Image (tube, rainbow, N blue to C red):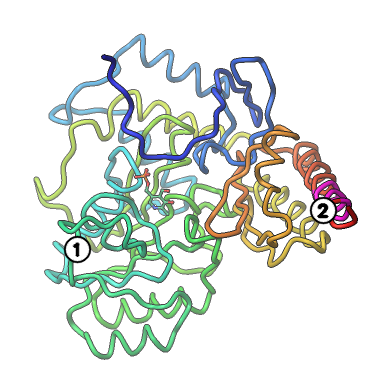
Amino acid sequence: MTMNLFDVYPINNISIVKAKGSYVWDDKDVKYLDMYGGHAVISIGHTDPHWVKRIEDQLNQIAFYSNSIKIPLQQQLAEKLGKVSGKEDYQLFLCNSGAEANENALKLASFYNGRKKVIAFSKAFHGRTSLTVAATDNPNIVAPVNQTENVIFLPFNDEAALEECFKNNAKEISAVIIEGIQGVGGINVATTSFLKKIRTFCNENNSVFIADEVQCGYGRSGKFFFADHAGVNADIYTMAKGMGNGFPVGGIIIAPHIKPKHFMLGTTFGGNHLACAAALAVLEVIESENLIQNAQRVGEHLMHELRSIPELQNVRGKGLMIGFDVPEELKDLKKNLLFTHRIFTGEAKPNVIRLLPSLALTIEEADQFLKSIKLEIRNIISSSKLVSQE
Ligand SMILES: Cc1ncc(COP(=O)(O)O)c(C=O)c1O
């Protein structure tokens, strides 16, 4: 009898054993272009040499000690994050994942204003822990123990519904949590005007604006936070995926008016030495290689070219967070990109292909993807014509 894995994901029968930049290799040494970034996690590119060295050096010093002592790397990370994000007056709390970041943000908001109600939006995904999954618009993953009446779902980008909800629940709303670009929900982009309205209603009602930047943040949209495109400051930003380039680290940054109290939040592993070294390396490379500008430039190129492919519908997104709808006759496109052209892409149900590559993706790599997708669309269309002639 051997122990088996608890089977929670449908997976591709591929084992990735090596990676570099925007490429990964399987155990048969087949090379793949990674337009999926291991689910938006790879920010500065796989096995970036500076990142590897920083982690190696840190590992040889100390990997972990508890948060009961001073860890100067945490302060260095806070300073660097403040500088790169432009939110220097915010405070950093470190944890280990996106769900944890959102759970802490929602909890902190509730401590701050003493309220219980949270506004979340249709198609939102905020994680799988108790309150984050309750604020996720997918009943299939909400266990009975997670069900709560404290979360109010409103239609995404619907300003009238938001206004009405604040009017009806005036002093009960603890927080509004929103992904500036919904990831799992299929790359839906919040409008500037909607984000501004959230800011206004939160100001008027002493509610907390939580920007879930776990997927769309950390430079992916071509600005450090997506909310920066709207010129709006959130009260709490949550971060994870791109923060460690694959090293598990998450965090929230908190506006100065929200004050800490001892023991209101806490963690064993959050902010450990190794995670801080990885996160510092990521910010150093983002800065020295101008990766945020790169994400904007390469993203614009990709989006422009994708829009010229008539078979792809509703190309949308910002920077290197791009989605498009695939019509029924091209339903094998994602699978064929992977198994014929050796290109990883992401998906969102029912028919969206999502692109979430490293922020260091080059124009040449983007063009390799564009060439392959055009070729594959032609292949699928011509083989379906052949079948219909038979
Ligand atoms: C927007 C968003 N928030 C939160 C999460 C949860 O992050 P994690 O899986 O690290 O808990 C995800 C994960 O996909 C996400 O996309």
Query: Which percent across, then down, holds residue 111?
Result: 14, 62
Is the C-beta separation of discs 1 and 2 under 8 Å?
A: no
Which residue shows up at 57% across the image and 38% down it? 37
Q: Amino acid at mark 2?
A: Ser
From the viewer's perspective, tell me whether residue 386 is left or right of residue 228. right
Quarter location, residue 61: top left
Query: Which percent across, then down, holds residue 253?
Result: 33, 51
Q: Amino acid at mark 1?
A: Gln
Which residue is under mark 2?
384
Q: Which residue is farthest front?
A: 390
Give the mark toward the camera: 1 or 2.
2
Which residue is under mark 1?
147
Q: Is residue 383 magenta?
A: yes
Query: Which percent across, then down, holds residue 266?
Result: 16, 42
Lower position in the chain sequence, tag 1 or tag 2: 1
Q: What crowding class fits label 1: few (fewer than 14 Cα within 10 Å), some (14-19), or many (20 or more)?
A: some
- In the displayed structure, 51 sits above or below 382; it is above
